[in-house]
Image: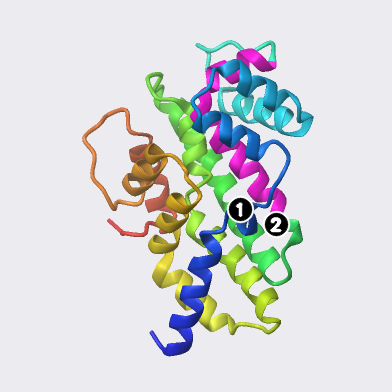
């Protein structure tokens, strides 16, 4: 790594560690995070979600779309039913990705275009993963857990591009795209794991991400990471190719 690349790499890592720069202080995200960390009762979480119609509608849409192909689960009639089914971990993951995506429109070009392209890729991967799960009839696996994991498939690229955009704004000068591409290609794993820890995403998400990208092995037949690994392999985007 050249001196310039090392300097940029360090600055990007510092931005990734700053939640407010990455995701902003948005909607119910902060109070929801505090409630979940405090491991409060689910009713408190439900009340927080219900106070923001946009995120409430998003969570209903996410879980209903994920479970649409299941004949064994009835569609929840109320927000409360849906959130109880999801559980606090999936609620937090869906909320995090909702506000992360909402932040994209504030990014300058070409980062906005690039990060939206990666996000569309995650949506495509999530849809493919859900369809595969339903085809296999794996009723013991949590489809929402699989979908939330899939939405983090290329988290390193998404989070790094967001950080590069903010770094350019701070420096008030462009960073050569060759450096951006090289660092993302070579440091995807570092960017991803640093972000998981800095943004306090759950340990299970990190573990299943490592399994999905063939960075950790698992004999657990209930691992959603193993389902996702096949899809990432077919798309040739595993961090550690098989």
Which is the main secondary structure of the residues drawn in magenta? helix
**Which sits earlier in the primary sequence, circle 2 or circle 1?**
2
Q: Are marks 2 and 1 in contact (CB under 8 Å)?
A: yes
* Badge 1 element: helix
Position of 22 relative to 56 (above/below): below
Q: Residue furthest bottom?
A: 3
The residue tagged 1 is 119
Highlighted magenta segment, given as a residue range? 79-103
Image quarter of the C terminus: bottom left
Position of 176 relative to 10 (above/below): below
Please give the label number shown on residue 13.
none
- Report if residue 240 lies within the magenta region: no
Position of 207 relative to 175 (above/below): above
What residue lies at 65% left-to-right and 70% top-to-bottom?
165
Position of residue 68 in the picture relative to residue 56 (left or right): left
What residue lies at 57% left-to-right and 36% top-to-bottom?
33
Q: Position of residue 187 (x, y in %)?
A: 41, 68
Q: Residue 144, can we see it?
A: no
* Badge 2 element: helix
Q: Position of residue 123 (x, y in %)?
A: 59, 45
């Amino acid at each position: 790594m050249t001196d310039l690349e090392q300097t940029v790499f360090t600055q990007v890592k510092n931005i990734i560690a700053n939640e407010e720069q990455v995701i902003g202080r948005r909607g119910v995200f902060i109070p929801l995070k505090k409630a979940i960390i405090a491991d409060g009762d689910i009713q408190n979480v439900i009340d927080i979600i219900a106070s923001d119609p946009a995120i409430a509608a998003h969570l209903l849409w996410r879980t209903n779309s994920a479970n649409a192909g299941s004949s064994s689960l009835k569609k929840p009639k109320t927000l409360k039913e849906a959130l109880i089914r999801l559980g606090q971990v999936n609620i937090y993951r869906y909320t995090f990705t909702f506000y992360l995506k909402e932040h994209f429109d504030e990014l300058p070009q070409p980062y906005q275009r690039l990060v939206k392209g990666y996000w569309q890729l995650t949506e495509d991967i999530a849809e493919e993963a859900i369809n595969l799960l339903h085809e296999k009839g794996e009723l013991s696996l949590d489809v929402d857990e699989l979908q939330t994991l899939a939405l983090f498939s290329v988290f390193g690229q998404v989070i790094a591009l967001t950080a590069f955009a903010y770094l350019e704004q701070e420096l008030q000068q462009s960073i050569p795209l060759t450096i951006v591409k090289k660092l993302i290609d070579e440091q995807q794993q570092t960017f991803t794991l640093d972000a998981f820890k800095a943004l306090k995403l759950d340990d299970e998400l990190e573990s299943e991400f490592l399994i999905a990208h063939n960075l950790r092995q698992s004999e657990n037949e209930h691992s959603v990471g193993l389902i996702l690994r096949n899809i990432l392999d077919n798309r040739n985007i595993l961090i550690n190719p098989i």
